[in-house]
Image: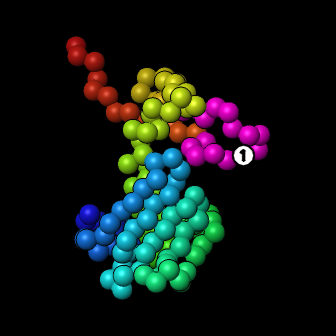
Amino acid sequence: MTVGGLLFQLKGAGIPAHAKITVDARRPHTVIDPVDESGDIGVLDGFSVSIVSPAGEVLEQRADAREHLQNASITTKWDRLNLVYFLGYALWGYYSLPYQLMRSDIEWTELHDGVTASRLWNQPPGSQPYPTLLVRQEQRAPPAQ
């Protein structure tokens, strides 16, 4: 997989072109192997991220990577944990979407023209399941005149 473009140039981050991506479609869990040229492995697990050596030693970790990026600007440089969080969630969302669409415990509803929301059923009170609420704006062509 090749990762590139202006965003990654601005953030000063990227992964090797030969990285293997492993995604668990049932929950936000993505492994990027390797995440850098030294062979370390990036792991997203829920809102937590970690960098693990090829020998399995945890080198870095962040319990709430989402919160860590809340006040970041477009010019904020990413460390390896930020990169793993961003790519991990993006790849998980992309690759797990077909599975998520087929789940019987998620109800998909069109709120109004082009805006879709989902709701997860049977969640314990006070829990934060994945996904809690997805809202997506679709771009549609204007009606033919």
Q: Quadrant of residue 38?
A: bottom left
- The spot of residue 87 in percent (x, y) is 41, 62
Query: Is residue 7 rendered to the left or right of residue 65?
Result: left
For disc 1, the marked residue is 127
Magenta region, main secondary structure: loop
Secondary structure at numbered mark 1:
loop
Q: Residue lying furthest right in this view?
A: 125
Identify residue type, mark 1.
Ser
Q: Residue at x 72, y 46 (%)?
A: 127
127 within the magenta span = yes
In the foreground, 114 or 31: 31
**Above-or-below relation of 2 to 132:** below
Q: Residue at x 25, y 71 (%)?
A: 18
Within 10 Å of the Cα at label 1, are there few (<14), some (14-19), or many (20+) other Cα atoms?
few
Q: In which quadrant of the rendered image does the N terminus lie?
A: bottom left
In the foreground, 19 or 115: 19
Q: Quadrant of residue 107?
A: top right
Q: Residue lying furthest top in this view?
A: 145
- The spot of residue 67 in percent (x, y) is 62, 63
- The spot of residue 27 in percent (x, y) is 53, 50
Residue 4 seen in this snapshot: no
**Above-or-below relation of 9 to 131:** below
Q: Quadrant of residue 123?
A: top right
124 within the magenta span = yes
Please provide the residue range marked out in magenta: 118-132
